[in-house]
Amino acid sequence: MNILIALLGLAIVFGLAFVASNGRNKIRYRPLIVMIVLQALLAFLLLNTVLGTTLITYVSTTFEALLDYAGEGITFVFGGVLAENRASIFFLNVLMPIVFISALIGILQYLRILPFIIRYIGLVLSKINGMGKLESYNAVASAVLGQSEVFISVKKQIGLLPKHRLYTLCASAMSTVSMSIVGAYMTLIPPQYVVTALVLNLFGGFIIASIINPYKVEPEEDILEVQEEEEKQSFFEMLGEYIMDGFKVAIIVAAMLIGFVALIAMLNGIFAAIFGISFQEMLGYVFSPFAFVMGVPWNEAITAGGIMATKLMTNEFAAMVSLQTLIEAGSLSDRTIGIVSVFLVSFANFSSIGIIAGAVKGLHEKQGNVVARFGLKLLYGATLVSMLSAIIVGLFI
């Protein structure tokens, strides 16, 4: 039964992508089939083999250690006041470690380790996905640097890109997440689904973009030139910059959570008073069919749909907090937890449209306006990427 529902879900996802395609006769099906098969193999490897379990355990343990190291700095600053309560403080336990992870990413960037890894993984991916080297590089870089920072590394090309290539770059940025906040995710949802989603979304972004926005990059256009820093920073200048960037991310996420969670609470109260049903429950009914075709059992589809809608309307953190509450209460099956967790690991939400358009506009105003015009289509495609990854994972839970 699960296989039949997964096939139905895949048909719906690909059908929705096909309907929105701007060049149906240009779709190349061979790379699509290869990438879908790779997604299935990777999901099976990560979730159902000893090798995959070992890999995920290693990644999880590494991030746990990093979070412990981050805790030393947090305790030093806040310990006198909140030493006993830190584990219950979301800002300290989940968001503040982003500062330390950001510093580590800066060090790896400075030592040229990350650029080397990103570039060559991107080159390998370009052989698989049938797209350009720039698109492949950007997808890998987005998963490390984040949806706004990644455009700085390709800023020389931004003004030269046609609309269709710019769409793919932005779609990759919205379909992935930043490595600096992966540790924060792992404190809220099971780590194995965070790791699996990161891998599957990388291919899923290309799959959906290849249907919605198909094109072929000519050899003379397929040039990868990554922006290097014009003025070499000293090590401590770089470190201070990345530490402050990480702190800004933590503060921004905290501010957005305060606003969004409070707004949802207000809407829940208003809807409950007027209609006898909360706002999230209403959205749950709207999104429940999508949750069901992703593989969520029907008796849990409304609850899952509400969490999915929360992510779309606000951000993934707000949705993960809701999911974590249900996990701790034992209200959801393992299957639903896995499928919904994978769906949540991306930047596919309305606020990301403004973030990405603003990042591009800061580098090239005209191209930023172009991104803003196809913003809703970006969100549409990125949401389909999340659904695709969740459906694939549902086959192996």
Image (spheres, rainbow, N blue to C red):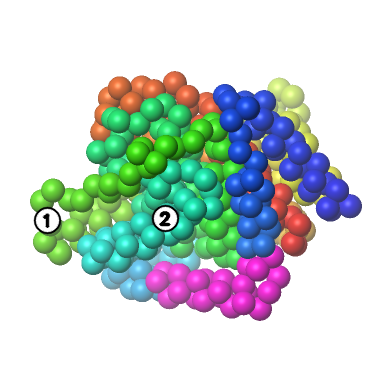
Q: Secondary structure at mark 1?
A: loop
**Which residue does the image show at 74% across and 55% down from the upper left?**
394
Which region of the structure is painted magenta? 43-67
In reply to whether residue 326 is colored magenta, the answer given is no
Q: Amino acid at mark 1?
A: Lys
The tally of labels here is 2
Which residue is at 22% across, 62% downward?
110
Task: Using the numbered discs, state the Cα–Cα distance from disc 2 to disc 1 in whole angstroms.
Answer: 26 Å
- For the C terminus, the image quarter is bottom right
160 relative to 85 in the view: left or right: left
Give how far across and how far down residue 191 sits, in percent: 57, 65
Q: Judge whether residue 55 is colored magenta.
A: yes
**Residue at x 41% of width, y 33% of height:** 166
Residue 46 or 89: which is nearer the viewer?
Answer: 46
Across and down, in percent, residue 186 comes to 53, 62
User: Of the numbered discs in the image, which one, if any, rests on residue 268?
Assistant: none
Rendered view: 134 above or below 95: above
**On screen, 209 above or below 198?**
above
Residue where numbered disc 1 is placed: 232
Circle 2 sits on which residue? Answer: 123
First reached walking from the N terminus: tag 2 or tag 1:
2
The picture quadrant where one finds residue 386 is: top right
Residue name at image x 54 percent, y 31 percent: 213
